Image: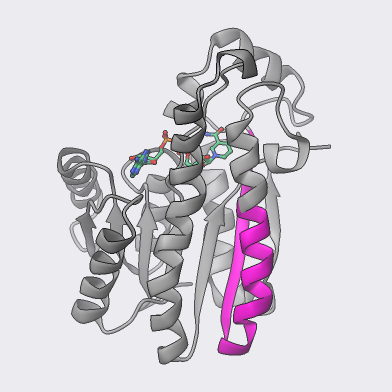
Amino acid sequence: MLLEGKIAVVTGGTRGIGYEIVRKYLANGAKVVLFGSRQETVDKALAQLKEENADWEAEGMWPKLTDAAEVEKAVLEIKEKYGRIDILVNNAGISQSTPLYNYTPEEFDKVIDLNVRALFYTILPTAKIMKEQGGGCILNTSSMVSISGQPAGVGYPTSKFAVNGMTISLARELAKDHIRVNAVAPGVTKTDMVASLPQQVVERISAQIPLGRPGEPEEVANAFLYLASDMASYVTGEILSVDGASRA
Ligand code: NAD
C-alpha cells in the first residue's frame, strides 16, 4: 500500500474531492484526521467511512480554519496523539462567480480568508512538526482557473493564483527540511461546488473540455495519492493539472 502507516490531515474532508482523498488515503494504509466545518458533517462522513470499511482508521475535527490559534491547537493535538504528521492536504475551499459590479469587499475577504489565509494557518504549525520529524508532504488544492482565470468571481481565481505562489515558494524554502510541497489543479469536477453553479455555466464550461466531460472526484484524488506517496519523492513545487486539458 502506498501510504502504509502514514498520518494524514485532510481539510474539507467531509464531501466532494476531500472525501475521495480521505477514502484513497485510508484504502492505501494511512490513518486520516479529516477536518470539516461542523461536527454533524464530520460525524456523517466518519459514519459513511466506517460503513465502507470498519478497519479504516479515521477521526474528525472541526477547527475554524480561518482562526490561526484554533488551527494550531488542532494540529498540536494531532501531533500529541499520533506523534507525527506525514501528510497535510489543504483542500477546503469556497468558490463564487459574482460579477465585479455586484461584489462586496466582505465577499472577497471571505474567499481569500478560507482559500489562502487558512492554508498558511495549517501549514505554519504543521511544517514545524514535519521539520522536527525529518520531513513530510504538503499538498494544496489549486484550480484550472489559477492558469486561465475566470470571467467572473474574481476572488476565486485570485485565491488560486495565490495558492500556486505559496506552493512553489514553500517548495523552494522547505526542500532543505525534506518537506515536499505540491498542488493539484482540478478542472470542473462533479461535486457540490459545481452543483451550486448555474446550469448554463456548467454546460458552457463542460462543452469546452477537450476530454468532453467533467472530472470525477476520484480522478482528482488519484493525483493527491500519487503526490503524497514515495512515487513522487523527487516531485516538489509542481502544480499538477487534472482537468482534461481545460486550461489549454
Ligand atoms: P465541496 O463544496 O464539495 O467541498 C468543499 C469542502 O470544503 C467541504 O468539505 C466543506 O466542508 C469544506 N469547507 C467549505 N467551507 C469551509 C469552511 N468555512 N471551513 C471549513 N471547511 C469548509 O467542494 P469541492 O469541489 O470538493 O472542492 C474542494 C476543493 O477543490 C476546493 O479547494 C476547490 O476550490 C477545489 N476545486 C474544485 C473544483 C470543482 O470543480 N469541484 C475545481 C477546481 C478546484
Looking at the image, which residue sits at the far top? 200
x then y, percent, for residue 109? 48, 37
x then y, percent, for residue 13? 35, 48
The front one of 22 and 136 is 136
The tally of labels here is 0
**Residue at 51 percent of width and 73 percent of height:** 137
| Image vertical order of residue 202 relative to residue 224, above or below | above
Residue 204, located in which quarter of the rendered image? top right
The front one of 19 and 145 is 145
Residue 157 visible (yes or no): yes
- Magenta span includes 186: yes
Q: Is residue 41 left or right of residue 203?
A: left
The front one of 207 and 12 is 12
The front one of 236 and 243 is 236
Query: Which segment did they paint magenta?
Result: 163-187
**Residue at 34 percent of width and 51 percent of height:** 65
Q: Is residue 217 left or right of residue 213?
A: left
Residue 1 visible (yes or no): no
x then y, percent, for residue 199? 55, 10
**Residue at 23 percent of width and 65 percent of height:** 57
Q: What's the magenta bit mostly, secondary-structure-wise?
A: helix
Q: Is residue 176 left or right of residue 37?
A: right
Q: Identify the colour scheme used.
A: one colour
